[in-house]
Amino acid sequence: MKKLHALIILLVVLVIALVLNYYTIPVGVPASNETIKIGFTAPLSGAAAGTGLSSKQGFELANELFPDVNGKKIEVFYGDDKADPALALTAVKKFVEVQNFKLIVSAFSGPTLALIPYSNEKEFLLTSPLSATPKLSGAGKHFFRVSSSSERMAQMTAKVALDAGFTTVAVLYEMNDYPIGWAESFKKDFEEIGGQVILEEQYGSKDTDMRAQLSRLDATDANAIVIISLTAPTASLVLKQAKELGIKKQIIGNETFGLKSVLSLTDLSEGAIVSQYDYNQQDPKTAEFLVAYRKEFTQGESELYSALGYDLYMIMREAISVCGENPVCITAYVKQKPSFVGVSGEYKINSLGDAERNLALSVISNGKTIPYK
């Protein structure tokens, strides 16, 4: 009986101690060892490394400038998936099952698409700075991206291309989730508004000779050739072979043609038209970001992609300040907000988890893109 009384007294003391401990911790000030951990997977080596590195650098810069939220330190852990869905899944399983992360970032479409079922099963937040395949729209329970669906990008490109007088086009695209979705959407939208796609050709990501496809496209009566590439190396190779063939038709490229290594090929890329986000580098917030970014980083393919990485971190941090690490709350928060104004421009996350952004046509001139008129 005495043992029972002693046990009861001990339990009461423990409960009182726990209650006192709870109420003496200031609200909003967590213990010093509490951190928020984010897993970030992207291609940091291989053909797509320049693009993946750009998004990582922007995310990294934002984390350096704003390293905490509500008194909690934000730690980011990076993994190299080489744009391979299997490698991305392996990295994220370690983040989630071994390290217990609740917040995951995946840069590219293929890996992100492969992660959606796992994210739905394990109930963690999945976000992306660059993924654009339309297959991701509405696919994840706790997913959003700060990039637009390529369906929207293609739709807007179709309109501005037709408005610019290109009524007939031929299309060449890379066989990968993002370019395929872009090409399918472009053909549908372009023809719905009165344009005509005369011929479509494809090439594999590991192909090294696209001359036959380019020759067939050039032999058509198309006003322009629309080229959709996943990475800078493939875009550069297509431009090189188009020049070797003496192709004079106007080339319209997706945003990959606005990457640094493509722009630098002035003898090949000069005069090509690029479809990309309407991105104002003169905006004060953007200009401030670019100063900080250029001071710290010299590598990377795209300052725009770095801006997207930066904005993804900032929108996640804002949502975490309200929701903590609750993926349901974070997803609901970003979808209900009327708009976000970031260093990559103004955008809204819609009910499908896609960013709604404006696009513009630019032309490559002396290694830079200038507005197309």
Image (tube, rainbow, N blue to C red):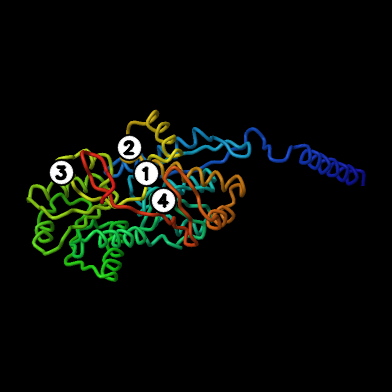
Q: From the viewer's perspective, is 40 left or right of 26?
A: left
Which residue is most to the front?
373
Q: What element carries label 1?
A: helix
> Which residue corresponds to the image point at 76% horizontal and 41% vertical from the top-left?
22
Question: Where's residue 278, x and y in %?
Answer: 36, 49
Q: Label 3 vs label 2: CA separation?
A: 21 Å
- Name the residue that disc number 4 marks: 89
Label disc, if present, on residue 268 of the rendered structure: 3
> Which residue corresponds to the image point at 87% horizontal and 46% vertical from the top-left?
8
Question: Where's residue 101, x and y in %?
Answer: 53, 45
Which residue is most to the top?
295
Q: Earlier in the sequence, mark 3 or mark 2?
A: 3
Q: Label 3 vs label 4: CA separation?
A: 37 Å
Q: What element carries label 2?
A: loop
- Name the residue that disc number 1 marks: 305
User: Does residue 287 appear anywhere in the picture?
Assistant: yes
Q: Nearer the viewer, residue 313 or 356?
A: 356
Q: Which amino acid does label 2 sit on?
A: Gly
Q: Which amino acid does label 3 sit on?
A: Leu
- Name the residue that disc number 2 marks: 300
